[in-house]
Image (cartoon, rainbow, N blue to C red):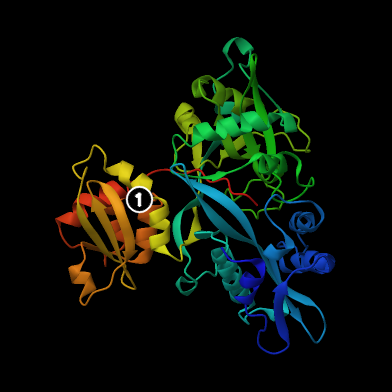
Amino acid sequence: MLTTSEVSALIPDTLAGDLVSRTATAADRDAVVDLQGVAHVGPDGRASDSIKLWQRDLFDRPHPTVTLDDMMVVADRRTGDIVASLMIVPQVWSYARVSFGVGRPELAATRPDYRGRGLMAHLMWSLAKRSEARGELVQAASDFLHLTDQMGYHMALPQRSGRGGRVADLPPAPADVEPVRLRPATMADVDVLARADERMRERVLLSCLRDEAQWRHEVAGRSPGNMVRDEVLIIEAPHGPVGYLAIGYGGIPTFPVPSWLPGQPCPEPVVSITSFELVSDVSWFDTAPSVLRQLATTTTDQERAPTSGFMLWLGSVHPAYAVVSDRLTRDSEQVGWFLRVPDLCAFLRRISPVLERRLVGSPAESFTGDLKVDVYQEGLRLRFAAGRILGIEPWDTPGRRRASDASLPRPMLLQLIFGQGDWDSLAPAYPDCRMQNGMGRLLLPRLFPRQPSAIWPLT
């Protein structure tokens, strides 16, 4: 792990002309907040106050992982103006209960008259290298529509997908008595929040881990009106708390349904649910409809118009979908996570215990030998002995593709690794992939099965 000064030495500080990039300072607060207002405007030309407040909170209110060292700006030395900014949010994700560090770029802003000069690409690359240097194995971006393969980001799994419906279509409460009630979460609820999330990890491949400080930040760490302030509600049964749900962006839907901008007023009364989890030994069958019914009438700490509908942004698979499946009338469009994995071997070594477990009980159990994979720009070799992984290393040889057990482009490999699909479901989209022999056909589908994820990222 590099020191802060060693990391800083990796980042070029000078751009073309009179522009210079550097780490943000406390003195940049107002300029960076104003930049967000200039860069992010609605169709009416007005600045997004919710985005400006998000940026201001990062200067004014302690964040559990972000410091000023995680924010970069570009300044014009002729005028002293801040003309571009970007930050990266350190966090920890879980891969089948194996943790790894992630850096998430956010709050990209460039003044309109400085666009087209590569400033955001420079900041993205600089912060990605900083993330790498402190040991984060993955960089994860969303809503960066300008990302290119050259920067190493590829769409690897859904970032937003969900189902929705109308409250009026839900079944009525049994005997007109709701089995649970909703209330705002408090600092005393951190334990139940953590336990509900732990149960969630039993059914998903990828999730974002939160420690006590991060849960406290979700409950009370952001100002009202902050664009990414999720309203956390506790689900309370007669015997005590049994789970939670998070209403994204203060109840403003987090993606167009059918068309609106994040942070802008919603044209229809729909409540947007970012996360919904229960502790163990609690029935989804009884709880999910009760929670959704009450979202139309629950009064919380944020003003919200009466709602007639709901959107569950809970990924492609979730227990709540199964419980109210016949009442779900709306599917969302999917938005992708763009993931950058600079060292594939290092990441695969990190998750090697998971890969070993996947072979148990399969025809490849106790396999001894090498699996050689060609990813076109590079090759990987996984060495097995009696089902255990002895090493994962770069592999190169003349005629590498023909010598491999399987060949495929990097975007496809990332989707395999992160459970977006299995080989057979992904192959039609990648006609240049090949299973070169039976070794690949035996191992790859078992090492990388399709699995759902539930990532509520730290912002």
What residue is shown with label 1? 421
Confirm whether residue 89 shows in the render. Answer: yes
Residue at image coords 44%, 30%? 322
Describe residue 239's horizontal placement relative to residue 444 as left or right.
right
- Residue 386, given in percent of the width and then of the height, sits at 22, 46
Residue at image coords 55%, 56%? 102
Quadrant of the rendered image containing residue 117: bottom right
Quadrant of the rendered image containing residue 273: top right
Q: Nearer the viewer, residue 401 or 133?
A: 133
Q: Which quadrant is home to the N terminus?
A: bottom right
Quadrant of the rendered image containing residue 171: top right
- Crowding near the residue tagged with mark 1, few <14, some 14–19, many ≥20 C-alpha atoms within 10 Å: many
Describe residue 151's horizontal placement relative to residue 262 as left or right.
left
Give the secondary structure at mark 1. Answer: loop
View extreme (top): residue: 175
- Determine whether 220 is above or below 145 in the image: above
- Determine whether 434 is above or below 121 in the image: above
Q: Which of 21 and 155 is in front in this view?
A: 21
Residue at image coords 39%, 55%? 349
- Residue 378, given in percent of the width and then of the height, sits at 33, 71
- Residue 390, given in percent of the width and then of the height, sits at 30, 54
Instruction: Count the numbered circles shown.
Output: 1
- Residue 136, given in percent of the width and then of the height, sits at 54, 59
Describe residue 215's horizontal placement relative to residue 134 as left or right.
right
Confirm whether residue 434 shows in the render. Answer: no
